[in-house]
């Protein structure tokens, strides 16, 4: 008997029983309604025995969680994924730190995950792999004989070819990525960069189907959350206008540049002193990676400078909070802000920008100041777009936002609200899966991929590197 289709999500992490992240929330609700599988790392590190798969159910979704060995995880996650791919894909080659040993760990974990997933697969599965942690995953699966339709979605930007070519082993990674049937990107710029790179680096080999699928939010649900009782009234009297920024503490988010622009605003506009306040919420992430430790020091130092120079006994120009908040708690805070300041140096989409818009009071909305280098800038045309490298331009955009008349604020909000409603998270998921299904109808054969040679060569080089180091 022909089995029904089952969507299989493969991601670095499995959703916890109670989970809240953007991707997890966006996919979970729909997956719970039909038989589906979510496969990934449990979040648990072990010293040994990583060959068991832990299964649990969230309604009709089965979660298959594997554990990873501490040492392999460190090389895969901190070493290659976040020490090479994340900085390079965000155009920070200066922060990229490659070594063979980490790369071997990255391949080993991908291979381990492919081997653990394979026995769980059914013939009619539609496999959807997520993000830069799993670039070679499809290649590994194909080498194990997996022939089901398999697609990949990149949540972060894809680097322009001149930068991408500086990533060691990029050709091997491209080959493995091209074992997918469909590759999805956040923006047309990302998609084009990938295709151009493939044509330059592997001109004789075919490029699979590619598409642009900007990730969205559920604007009505977020609006409702934003109308909830706030845990705290950030600006209880109207004498202070609030600027709010919410980010993971990450160098791609442009926080030091933002603080410098805010300092410039205060310096140049005496009339704003005492009347404006920036609240920056930025819980630390990836604290094992050195660049993140440096960033945190830089920010605490800039915070001190701004407070030292401008704070008075009855006015704090800046509140910097490292605490993590649930999205349900954040939404009512977004609604209180006059300005949402979202200025990453480079970002796949940036869901905070969309969440900020969704949270606004339609009768009295705040203004979004948005980096032109966030994927969201390709959609949110009602935002004030800025170059995050230009403190003067950012300060001026903040000033314009703080003084923008109600009518213009409403007009800009309405344009962006329409975009949010036309590009929801449900639409993103459905459109992607629809296109992946179409690949099945075309009966495109799975691309063969030789992983054994790749793994053998890499582990030999890594062993050599380790031997040399001792
Ligand atoms: P992130 O780099 O994590 O995601 P972003 O899209 O801004 O960036 O945020 C994802 C989710 O995390 C959002 O739902 C947001 O509310 C939440 N979040 C962010 N900062 C938070 C904070 N300080 N406290 C609590 N929650 C916070 C990656 C890519 C993005 C892409 C997403 C989804 O880097 O470019 O938009 O995946 O594809």
Image (tube, rainbow, N blue to C red):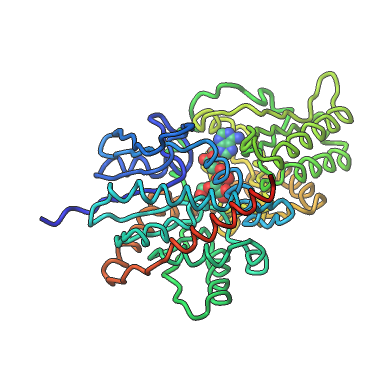
Name the image quarter holding the N terminus.
Answer: bottom left
Q: Is residue 234 above or below residue 145?
A: above
User: Residue 206 at x, y = what percent?
Assistant: 44, 76
User: Residue 150 at x, y = what percent?
Assistant: 36, 59
Among all residues in the image, which is located at the extreme bottom? 204
Q: Quadrant of residue 373?
A: bottom right
User: Residue 108 at x, y = what percent?
Assistant: 48, 50
Among all residues in the image, which is located at the extreme left? 1
Name the image quarter holding the C terminus.
Answer: top right
Decide if residue 12 is on the left or right side of residue 429.
right
- Of the pair 383 and 8, the residue shown nearer to us: 8
Decide if residue 97 is on the left or right side of residue 6.
right
- Of the pair 144 and 85, the residue shown nearer to us: 144
User: Residue 369 at x, y = what percent?
Assistant: 67, 48
| Viewer can see residue 55 | yes
Looking at the rendering, the quadrant in which ligand 1 lies is: top right
Decide if residue 278 is on the left or right side of residue 366.
right
- Of the pair 397 and 25, the residue shown nearer to us: 25
| Viewer can see residue 360 | no
Q: Is residue 158 above or below residue 394?
A: below
Residue shown at the point (64%, 36%) measured from the top left: 288
Q: Is residue 469 above or below residue 64?
A: below
Decide if residue 264 is on the left or right side of residue 419.
right
Q: How many marks?
A: 0
- Of the pair 45 and 298, the residue shown nearer to us: 45
Residue shown at the point (63%, 46%) measured from the top left: 368
């Amino acid at each position: 008997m022909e089995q029904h289709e089952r969507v299989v999500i493969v991601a670095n992490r499995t959703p916890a029983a109670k989970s809240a992240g953007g991707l997890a929330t966006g996919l979970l609700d729909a997956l719970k309604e039909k038989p589906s599988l979510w496969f990934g790392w449990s979040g648990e590190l072990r010293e040994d025995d990583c060959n068991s798969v832990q299964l649990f159910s969230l309604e009709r979704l089965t979660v298959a969680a594997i554990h990873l060995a501490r040492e392999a995880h460190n090389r895969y996650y901190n070493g290659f994924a976040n020490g090479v791919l994340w900085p390079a894909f965000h155009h920070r080659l200066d922060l990229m730190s490659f070594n063979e040993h980490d790369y071997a760990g990255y391949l080993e974990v991908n291979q381990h995950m492919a081997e653990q997933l394979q026995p769980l697969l059914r013939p009619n599965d539609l496999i959807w792999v997520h993000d830069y942690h799993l670039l070679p995953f499809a290649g590994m699966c194909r080498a194990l004989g997996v022939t089901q339709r398999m697609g990949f979605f990149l949540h972060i930007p894809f680097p322009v070819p001149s930068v991408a070519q500086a990533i060691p082993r990029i050709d091997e990674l491209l080959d493995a990525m091209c074992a997918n049937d469909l590759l999805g990107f956040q923006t047309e710029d990302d998609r084009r960069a990938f295709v151009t790179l493939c044509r330059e680096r592997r001109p004789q080999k075919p490029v699979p189907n590619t598409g642009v699928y900007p990730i969205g939010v559920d604007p009505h649900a977020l609006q409702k959350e934003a109308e909830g009782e706030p845990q705290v009234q950030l600006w209880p009297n109207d004498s202070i206008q609030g600027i709010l920024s919410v980010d993971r503490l990450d160098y791609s988010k442009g926080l030091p540049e933002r603080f410098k622009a805010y300092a410039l605003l205060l310096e140049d506009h005496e009339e704003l002193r005492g009347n404006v306040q920036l609240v920056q919420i930025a819980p630390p992430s990836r604290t094992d990676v050195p660049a993140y430790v440096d960033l945190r020091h830089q920010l605490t130092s800039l915070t001190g400078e701004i407070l030292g120079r401008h704070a008075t006994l009855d006015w704090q120009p800046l509140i910097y909070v490292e605490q993590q908040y649930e999205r349900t708690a954040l939404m009512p805070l977004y609604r209180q802000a006059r300005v949402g300041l979202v200025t990453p140096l480079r970002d796949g989409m940036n869901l905070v920008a969309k969440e900020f818009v969704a949270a606004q009071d339609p009768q009295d909305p705040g203004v979004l100041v948005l980096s032109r280098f966030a994927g969201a800038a390709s959609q949110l045309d009602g935002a004030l777009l800025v170059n995050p490298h230009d403190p003067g331009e950012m300060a001026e955009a903040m000033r314009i936002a703080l003084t923008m008349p109600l009518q213009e604020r409403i007009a800009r909000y309405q344009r962006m609200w329409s975009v949010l409603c036309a590009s929801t998270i449900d639409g993103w998921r459905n459109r992607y899966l629809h296109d992946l299904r179409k690949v099945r109808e075309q009966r495109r054969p799975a691309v063969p991929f030789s992983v054994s040679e790749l793994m053998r060569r890499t582990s030999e080089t890594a062993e050599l590197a380790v031997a040399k180091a001792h």
